[in-house]
Amino acid sequence: MDSIKNIAKTLAIAFAGAIVAIFIYSKINNQPHDYPLQGSTPVQLTNYSSPASPQAQLPDLTLSAEKSVHAVVHITTKVKAPSYSGNDNPLYDFFFGPRGNYSPRGNNQEQEFSLGAGSGVIISPEGYIVTNNHVIDDADNIEVVLNDNRKFTAKVIGRDPNTDIALVKIDAKDLTYLVWGNSESLKLGEWVLAVGNPFNLTSTVTAGIVSAKSRSIEIISGPLPLESFIQTDAAVNPGNSGGALVNASGDLVGITAAIASKTGSYSGYSFAVPASIARKVVDDLKQFGQVQRAMLGVEIRTVDDNLAKEKHLGKIEGVYVGKIAEDGAARQAGIKAEDIITAVNGNQVNTVAQLQEQIAKYRPGDKVNITAKRDGEVKQFSVVLRNTKGDTSIIKESFSVLGAEFGPITEKDKGRLKIDEGVQVLNLTKGKLKDAGVKIGFIITDINKMAVSSVEDIKRVLSQASNKKPILVEGVYPTGEWTYYVFKLEE
């Protein structure tokens, strides 16, 4: 009997132990386990957890946006629509179109209407503002509105149709401004902000990434067009032109210039003039009144598959030299036709736009190192760049060819003739004005549709004019007779 009780007791204890063991095992089995692997760190098996939201990895653009909006201005332009009169001048008709009665400023016959609006970027505390040439082109009056709603009348310092960059200035001090950034260091996929005034919606900020660099879209109509745009997907619309493209640090890396669209509104692509080009143009306009364009003196093509096969190049790279200018910098340095240019000062170039952008950073007389391939052999050339006339000098202004001495007009004459500004011809010697028929006393109010109020204005306007295109000088004599004269700086 005792033996039966002992057996039953043993079974009960065993059963209870089994229950406890099962309970403990189930608890332990639900915890993560470390499985040591030979020669490696233990691997932990855990339940799947979703990765952090992509939003947490985006850059903080708030400081860049705040910094930029205070340095981007709203620009509105006005033009005076004259009616024409006076003696027939077939040269005027040929170059500037037919006209009726001419009285651009007198007799209260002028009409003033808005041409449009755009944006600009303050680049110095003294009021220098960079914008697009097409924003202020042909404008008689340029009004700048700051982010704090202060208004100023801007004066054109210079403009460059070849890059679509212009520089204007307002009479102000201690302004918030943007610092030039390094556009060449931009990477594809890098975040940027476009700041401007689309559809007159002031201080608008949009974000996107750099979609492409050194893009040529063939929209610049200057005599020597230079296109190497930064392409982004930041939303840009009419009114953004001349605004800022800034990086995440708030540095100015481009000037917004264009959109690619079939509707005229944003459709996914926008383009900006890179800071590498815009900054040099601005510096030239401030220092010389006109852009000092450096020329390599070559006719070039991007090497693509077709050209590589046609010329048996073997590799698709660089820029193909088709022809060499007789008086060009390239010929002087030893570069020959059919050479393949691959780098400028160590910066790789694989398209015409890339090569032009690199050369555009320099002035006539500057020396650059060109890397090129000839029959598969890499060669180095030290090239002294030249100007558009074929020498290494800085191109001077065209003012001296006028052959005239100028002076200011009196407030009395302004009131009597109903003009706001102008420069009077005080003396004439042999020169373009005398040859065109200008008489002493003539008051010049406009040159090539740009208002002038000082000798510096005349110099600035002439420096922007092409030597081969006509110059239109408009104004009034003290008698109240309005007239115009047309001539070329070079015949």
Image: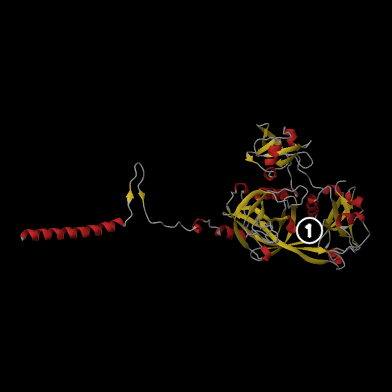
Tell me the amino acid under the disc marked 1: Asp
The answer to whether residue 397 shows anywhere in this view is yes
- 426 horizontally vs 460: left or right: right
Above or below: residue 19 compared with residue 214: below
Q: Residue at x 66, y 53 (%)?
A: 272
Q: Residue 86's spot in the image, x, y percent?
A: 92, 61
Q: Residue at x 92, y 55 (%)?
A: 90
Can you identify the residue that label 1 sits on?
138
Which residue is at the front of the view, 20 or 302? 20
- 100 horizontally vs 167: left or right: right
Q: Quadrant of residue 12?
A: bottom left
Q: Residue furthest bottom?
A: 108
Q: Residue furthest left?
A: 1
The answer to whether residue 438 shows anywhere in this view is no
Q: Residue 50's spot in the image, x, y percent?
A: 44, 57
Q: Residue at x 82, y 67 (%)?
A: 111
Q: Residue furthest right?
A: 87
Which residue is at the front of the view, 437 or 386? 386
- 270 horizontally vs 20: left or right: right
Which residue is at the front of the view, 376 or 383? 376
**Helix, strand or loop status at disc 1:** loop
Q: Residue 407's spot in the image, x, y percent?
A: 84, 55
Q: Residue 457's spot in the image, x, y percent?
A: 79, 54
Local crowd size for mark 1, using a 10 Å CA cut-off: few (<14), some (14–19), many (≥20) = some
